[in-house]
Image (cartoon, rainbow, N blue to C red):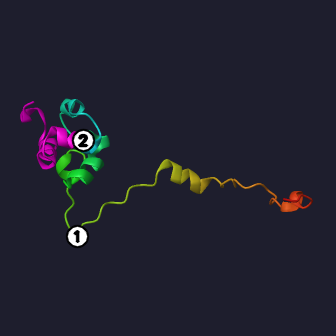
Amino acid sequence: MTSAHFDEGLRLAIEKAGGIRALARELGITGAALCVWKRVPAHRILQLEYVTSIPRERLRPDLYRRRIRGTRRARSPPSCAARTATLAPRRSARPATAWTSSNDSGRSG
């Protein structure tokens, strides 16, 4: 398999791990499965970051942008579930009356 088949992030991860077979072993997949990849799949980015110590921004720059020191991320708007939770009263999962051990009072062990 030529290295031209892989994008730069995946090629870097393969080199750092010591080859396709070594990286596949670290990920718990076969070398053949890894050879099908053209770039690091989104669901494997964090695992590859952990295994190779290559930052996710280098593995998939199309999904992760490098942050500049001293800048903060913009706050995202609350999710639909968070907005709904603030509008609707929450139902309690507990029963209206507390359970007591009075049912066990006549039994002996």
Q: Are marks 1 and 2 in contact (CB under 8 Å)?
A: no
Tell me residue 10's x, y (percent): 16, 42
Q: Between residues 109 and 16, which one lies in front from this camera angle? A: 109
Residue 96's tag is: none
Q: In the rendered image, which residue does mark 2 sit on?
A: 25
Tell me residue 43's x, y (percent): 32, 41
Residue at 20% across / 52% down in the picture? 52
Instruction: Place residue 36 in its image quadrant.
Output: top left
Earlier along the polypeptide chain: callout 1 or callout 2? Answer: 2
Residue at 56% across / 50% down in the picture? 84
Foreground tag (1 vs 2): 2
> Would residue 69 be found to the left or right of residue 11 on screen?
right
Residue 70's tag is: 1
Identify residue type, mark 1: Gly
Residue 64 visible (yes or no): no
* Residue furthest bottom as drawn: 70
Screen quadrant of the C terminus = bottom right
C-alpha distance separating marks 1 and 2: 38 Å
| Residue 20 belongs to the span the image colors magenta | yes
Residue at 13% across / 36% down in the picture? 6
> Would residue 94 be found to the left or right of residue 76 on screen?
right
* Residue furthest front as drawn: 109
Instruction: Place residue 37 in its image quadrant.
Output: top left
* Residue furthest right as drawn: 106
* Number of other residues with Cα within 10 Å of mark 2, as a class: few under 14, some 14 to 19, many 20 or more: few
Element carrying mark 2: helix
Q: Which residues are magenta?
A: 1-25
* Number of other residues with Cα within 10 Å of mark 1, as a class: few under 14, some 14 to 19, many 20 or more: few
